[in-house]
Structures are given as structure tokens and as C-alpha cells.
Amino acid sequence: MTISAQSIFDGLLPERLSFRSEADYFAPSNIALSKYWGKRDKELNLPLNSSLSISLHKWGSQTKISVAADGRDQVRLNGEAVDLEQPFARKLIAFVDRFRRGQNLPLNIQTFNSIPTAAGLASSASGFAALTGALDQAFGLGLPKDKLSMLARIGSGSASRSFWHGFVQWDRGQLTDGRDSFARHIDVQWPEFRIAIINVTSKPKSVSSRDGMNHTVATSPLYKVWPEQAERDCADIGAAVQDKDFSKLGTLAEANALAMHATMMAARPGLQYLLPESFTILEKVRELRADGHEVYATMDAGPNVKLIFLQSSEDDVNANFPQAQIIEPFAAL
Ligand code: DP6
């Protein structure tokens, strides 16, 4: 039996919605230390493996919702009106419609992304999380975060992890309806933990993560080994976070990212998001380690490289990567 994504919303929302209050919700962006790559159910957006991320502090999306005075939906991004036919607005409205289910509730939806465009980071994770949180407020639903995470997951998998600061784990779950596939906060504070974004290009990616992972699962002979390895990496990275074992965490996170890229390079035709500049950065990271500096790298569906290190390596990172944008995930907000 196939379960529709709409039935998940129907099961969590009251039949009739009404606008309760203006909403204003912030969700941080996140970077996976143990990656989600591949779906076991495309309709419900269920992953083949669990993943673990670190949230990017103040970098994320802020979504405000109010009643549309003229009775027509309005979408604004960073202050600018967006045509409702644009892909960004269409995706957003399609998600809002999963809540409204035909009810006449026109909304004014404004999203502000604090992620510097130059960082070339995807904003779909924080975007869907902030939208879900703001809809919950606007309609006075009072859903707990695990349910918000589950609904945002249907918009974009990585959005399930954007409801908390710090470390977050998205458990793959076992149930066919995905009721057990949502994220949870890991209660570990690590003030010395740092992330640096090294921008290689801010051009939009040519293949979306969604298309890239579907193509990898369908055609890559190396994908056979990924789900099991990724599940193990996620558990081991989780243990390294609990033990604050930075060498173990960094080693595993870098290996996990490289393994994900290996599965997609082996897809047919091959898929490669990394550019020569990305490999040059990776080489430099290896050299830094050979000199005794504990710096590790991770890369997502794009050529930019993210470094992970501790405060004690901040000067080395600045000296070797003057263009790096350093984030302190545990700084006061
Ligand atoms: C490489 O969450 O963007 O960043 O669920 O299809 O919207 P969809 O995919 P998305 O994929 C993120 C892939 C990744 C790894 C990760 O964030 O775990």
C-alpha cells in the first residue's frame, strides 16, 4: 500500500484551520557531518540512512506570516516580491497548500535568508524548517518539534534537522509511513567547535541534491555499500560527539563525505559536484594535518568545502584560508 504525503499532514492537522496570529520563526541552516544521500520512499521523503548535523548558529532563514490583506497569496524573499510562478514560490505555496487543503486562507509569506549568498550554501533546509515553524504559529497548531521535523522532512530531508541549534540527528526510522523518521537534538555543548565555509563558487548547482541522490541510488554500483556504511558512520560520529573525541569525529566526517562523493562519481553517467579548487583545498587540509593541525573537511552537493576544527586551530585556518567564513555554532545567540 502506498501512503501519500498528504495523509501525513491530514493525520497531524485539525480538519479546519483558522488564522490565529502573525508568525515569525527562525530556523538555522545545518551541515551534515554524517550525510543523508538516498531515499527509501520518494513520496514521503524517507531516507535510506540516518544522518547527523551541526547547525550554523545565526545563519539560517527567518519566516514571517500574516494574513494577505487583498485575499491573494504573496511571497517575498529577502524583501523582494517573488512571482508566484517562480520555482521558489511554487515549491513554497505547494507546501503551504498541504496545510490549507483547499481552505481559503490567503497568506503573506516573507522569508529572509541570513546565509550570505557568497557562502553558496543551500537554503532549503532552513527554509522549509522556518516555513513549517511559522505555519504552526500562524494556525495556532502547537505541534511539538518532532512533528514539525517530520512535516518539514516532506519538504526537504535536511530541513528535518533545522529545528535545533548544535548537534542534531535524523533517525532514518523503520516504519513504512515514516512516523518514526524525524530529527532530535543531541544534548552536547561544545563551545570550542568551529566550522569554516570555504567558498569555491556561488553559482547555483546544475543538479539538485534530490536529482543527484535519486540518480546515484538508481545507477551507481557503489551505492550498494552506502546505506550500511552511512548508518555505521552516523552511529560512530554520534558516539564521538558524546565523547567529545574530535579526532574521531573529524576523521569519520571527512571519510563519510568522501564516500558519498565516491558513490555519485560512480553513478552512470557520473556525477561530480567537486571542482579542481575543491580538491586543492582538500589537499591543503591534508597537509595541515600532516603538520599536526587537526582540521577536517566535508562537502555536500556542491563544490564548496566546509572545514571542521576546534578553536585552538582557528589561527591556522585563518592563515591558510584567508577567505574562510568561520562560524561558532555554540556562541551565545
Ligand atoms: C548532500 O535535503 O536537499 O546536503 O530531501 O531531496 O530535498 P531532499 O534533499 P536535501 O539533501 C541534502 C543532501 C546533502 C547531505 C545532507 O544534508 O545530509
Image (cartoon, rainbow, N blue to C red):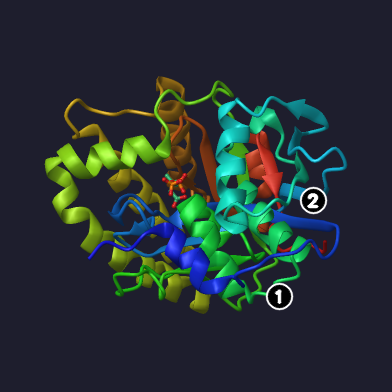
Amino acid type shown at disc 1 = Gly
Q: State the CA–CA distance, disc 1 to disc 2.
A: 16 Å
What is the quadrant of residue 318 in the picture? top right
In the drawing, does residue 69 fall left or right of residue 157? right
Amino acid type shown at disc 2 = Ile
Residue 301 rendering spot, x and y as whole percentages: 43, 37
Q: Nearer the viewer, residue 324 or 68?
A: 68
Asked if residue 123 shows in the view, the reply is no
- Mark 2 beta carbon near ligand 1 (under 8 Å): no
Q: Which residue is mark 2?
A: 65
Q: Secondary structure at mark 2?
A: strand
Asked if residue 74 shows in the view, the reply is yes
Residue 150 rendering spot, x and y as whole percentages: 50, 66
Residue 56 rendering spot, x and y as whole percentages: 66, 53
Residue 255 rendering spot, x and y as whole percentages: 34, 51
Q: Which residue is mark 1?
A: 142
Q: Nearer the viewer, residue 258 or 132?
A: 132
In the drawing, does residue 92 fall left or right of residue 157? right
Total marks drawn?
2
